[in-house]
């Protein structure tokens, strides 16, 4: 809390006011007041957690003694001490009627319609008539007074009607937290014959057999999208959608007319896009295989590559050093009140992002330089070589090939741009192979 009061809030221009502690960060000038507010916040948080733990422990002790802590379900009411469920005769008859229909193998819809036609009040209507409405519990059932399948399903799935009592079905994820999670079987308190049963265990088990849980069908069909995770709109940067529910699958952008311009309005034929990527990839794979199979001139390529790598590494290190100096100058301007907190935060985040990108590029180049100094192929080239050996003159583009060789494919109305994995490695190979002949008779490679 103290770090927020002294550093983050002033930097972000946040004014912190604590009425109970008579503290206002705008008017307070001494560190003692800030420290007092921070200590009180810590103590209050600790006190809140302690109270929460004690309440939970008390509740668990009640559960161990079979003392009910929740509201009774439809068909039951509390006893005079409010420690146990007892049967509510009128509501219990409605529950028995539900199970009677279920045992006759009627569907949930048929049961709900039969209960409505028989004039049996719904659980919410019955509770409202007997002043048992739970606070904040309103539903569609309160308006039309008709049974719904969800109410029927809740009754026939609830083992409480066999006399079983299950306590602590949910638990708080942390002390003093409002969020809960489902309790595991070992965390629950389950008691058989805890109260009088409305339905026998045999009838309950038979109903579960007649109405087994239904698996929810998939909400959508998963199509075999080759470019899944690699196709993006060049304008908005979002992933392209894949429509495979037709004879001709297509890619399209669902975010049209964004604030940054217009996204592609047309739909791109998936087969044509995949064939275009394959047509561009095959010559590159052949080029890579020729480079790997050629012994003559490889070391000279490595020496040239090492020289280029060192030049690029030196440039990036200078740029990173310049970025770090700029960050120091930026802080000095902020400390001298020549920059607003908003401007300082924005420029600092921009420089931090740029510095992180430069550091990642430097790390990659350092690994490449080490490999080239040892006379071995860089790790990127080794990975590409191993992958290229698996795909000799492929006729069809596969998702595995896309995952290995394609970084992203950007779509626009004018063009489709392919960005390859290890783009700089491919570019160097093209330059190296074009600069020197690799065949034994001195002929240059064809394209």
Image: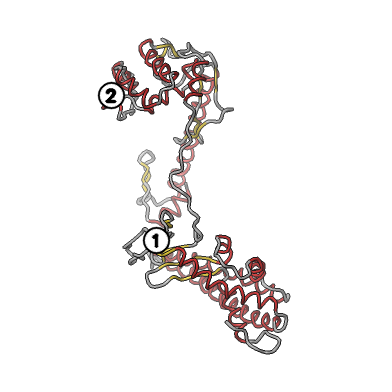
- Mark 1 to mark 2 CA distance (whole Å): 46 Å
In the image, what residue occupies the spot 57% across and 75% down? Answer: 283
Where is residue 444? Give x, y as percent: 63, 87
Q: Nearer the viewer, residue 258 or 15?
A: 258
Where is residue 317? Give x, y as percent: 58, 74
Q: Nearer the viewer, mark 1 or mark 2?
A: 1
Where is residue 348? Give x, y as percent: 45, 64
Residue 170 vertical position relative to residue 412 in the rendered view, above or below: above
Mark 2: secondary structure: loop
Q: Nearer the viewer, residue 383 or 223?
A: 223
Quick one: which residue is furthest to the front in this view?
247
Q: Nearer the viewer, residue 244 or 128?
A: 244
Image mark for residue 145: 2
Q: Nearer the viewer, residue 396 or 118?
A: 396
Residue on which the image places disc 1: 252
Q: Residues within 10 Å of mark 2 (few under 14, many from 20)?
A: some
Residue 56 vertical position relative to residue 432 in the rendered view, above or below: above
Disc 1 vs disc 2: Cβ atoms closer than 8 Å?
no
Q: Residues within 10 Å of mark 1 (few under 14, many from 20)?
A: many
Q: Is residue 71 left or right of residue 190?
A: left
Residue 22 lies in quadrant: top left
Mark 1: secondary structure: strand
């Amino acid at each position: 809390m103290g770090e927020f009061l002294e550093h983050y809030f002033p930097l972000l221009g946040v004014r912190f006011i604590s009425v109970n502690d008579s503290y206002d960060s705008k008017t307070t000038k001494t560190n003692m007041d800030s420290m007092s507010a921070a200590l009180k916040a810590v103590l209050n948080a600790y006190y809140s957690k302690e109270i929460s733990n004690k309440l939970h422990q008390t509740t668990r002790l009640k559960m161990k003694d079979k003392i009910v802590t929740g509201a009774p379900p439809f068909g039951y009411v509390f006893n005079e001490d409010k420690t146990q469920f007892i049967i509510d005769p009128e509501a219990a008859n409605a529950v028995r009627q539900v199970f009677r229909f279920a045992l006759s193998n009627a569907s949930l819809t048929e049961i709900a319609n039969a209960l409505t036609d028989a004039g049996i009040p719904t659980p919410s209507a019955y509770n409202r008539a007997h002043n048992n409405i739970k606070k904040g519990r309103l539903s569609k059932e309160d308006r039309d007074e008709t049974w719904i399948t969800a109410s029927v399903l809740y009754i026939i799935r609830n083992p409480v009607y066999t006399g079983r009592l299950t306590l602590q079905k949910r638990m708080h994820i942390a002390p003093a937290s409002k969020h809960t999670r489902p309790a595991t079987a070992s965390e629950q308190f389950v008691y058989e014959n805890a109260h009088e049963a409305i339905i026998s265990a045999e009838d309950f088990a038979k109903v579960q057999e007649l109405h087994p849980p239904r698996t929810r069908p998939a909400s959508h069909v998963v199509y075999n999208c080759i470019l899944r995770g690699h196709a993006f709109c060049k304008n908005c940067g979002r992933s392209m959608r894949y429509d495979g529910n037709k004879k001709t699958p297509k890619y399209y952008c669902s975010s049209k007319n964004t604030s940054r311009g217009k996204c592609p309005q047309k739909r791109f034929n998936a087969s044509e896009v995949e064939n275009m990527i394959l047509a561009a990839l095959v010559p590159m794979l052949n080029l890579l295989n020729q480079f790997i199979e050629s012994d003559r001139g490889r070391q000279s390529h490595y020496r040239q590559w090492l020289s280029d790598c060192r030049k690029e590494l030196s440039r990036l290190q200078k740029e990173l050093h310049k970025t770090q100096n700029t960050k120091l100058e930026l802080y000095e301007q902020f400390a001298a009140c020549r920059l607003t907190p908003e401007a300082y935060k924005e420029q600092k985040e921009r420089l931090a992002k740029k510095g992180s990108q430069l550091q990642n590029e430097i790390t990659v180049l350092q690994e490449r330089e080490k490999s080239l100094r040892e006379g071995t192929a860089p790790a990127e080239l080794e990975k590409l070589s191993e992958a290229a050996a698996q795909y000799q003159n492929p006729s069809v583009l596969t998702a595995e090939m896309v995952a290995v060789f394609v970084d992203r494919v950007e779509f626009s109305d004018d063009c489709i741009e392919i960005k390859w994995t290890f783009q700089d490695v491919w570019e160097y190979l093209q330059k190296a192979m074009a600069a020197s002949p690799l065949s034994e008779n001195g002929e240059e490679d064809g394209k």
